[in-house]
Structure formats: C-alpha cells, structure tokens
Image (cartoon, rainbow, N blue to C red):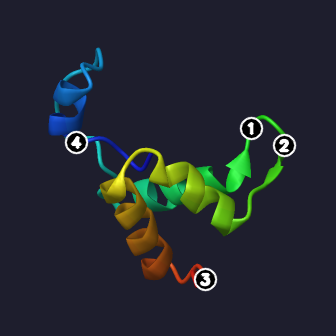
Amino acid sequence: GMGLTAVEIKEKEILIPARDMIPETIEEEIVSLADKFFSKIINQEKEIELIRIEVQRYGYLHCKRFDELSKKYSICID
C-alpha cells in the first residue's frame, strides 16, 4: 500500500501501534513512491501500470495516495 491509517490498522487488526503511518515529509513521500518502482524479488524496475494494479488491492485510498504523489513529483500517469 501507500502507508496505513490508524483506522486501517484497527480494522485489519494489524499488530502495530494504531496511529497514522502515512508519508508526511518530502523525504518520506519520495522514499515511499520510489519503493514502489523497484521490485526486490525480480531485481528490476516496475512499470507504473503494474504498480497501480498492486496498490489497488489495498483499496481506493492507497491508489489515490499513489496517484497524488505521482502527480506531485511529475511521474507520468495516463
């Protein structure tokens, strides 16, 4: 996904502190976004279309955050 909210943590019963864990600083946003573009499994860069499909499985808000950050940092989304 693209970070977690306290509500998501509680709803999904994730065993971490229930607090918002959304990228806030420029550095956090860039690292979060860059992390989506590089696959640790196949050791290569991912296409934006694949990233959007992967992020969508976490829900609308994650996809929205990805799109907003992509637009903010001028990454091309059609």
Q: Position of residue 11 (x, y in %)?
A: 19, 28
Q: Position of residue 21 (x, y in %)?
A: 28, 41
- CB atoms of marks 2 and 1 within 8 Å: yes
Mark 1 and mark 4 lie on one chain; the one further toward the N terminus is: 4
Q: Position of residue 31 (x, y in %)?
A: 52, 54
Residue at figure coordinates x 74%, y 45% from the top left: 39
SS of the residue at dot 1? loop
Q: Sequence order check: which comes first, mark 4 or mark 2?
A: 4
Compare residues 46 and 19 and report the one nearer the observer: 46
11 to the left or right of 48 = left
Instruction: Quote the CA–CA distance across marks 3 and 4.
Output: 26 Å
Q: In this view, does 67 lie above or below 65?
A: below
Q: Name the residue under label 4.
A: 5
**Which comes before the other along the chain, label 2 or label 3?**
2
Distance in Å between CA atoms under marks 3 and 1? 22 Å
Label 1 belongs to which residue? 40
- Residue depicted at x 73% and y 64%: 47
- The amino acid sitting under disc 2 is Asn
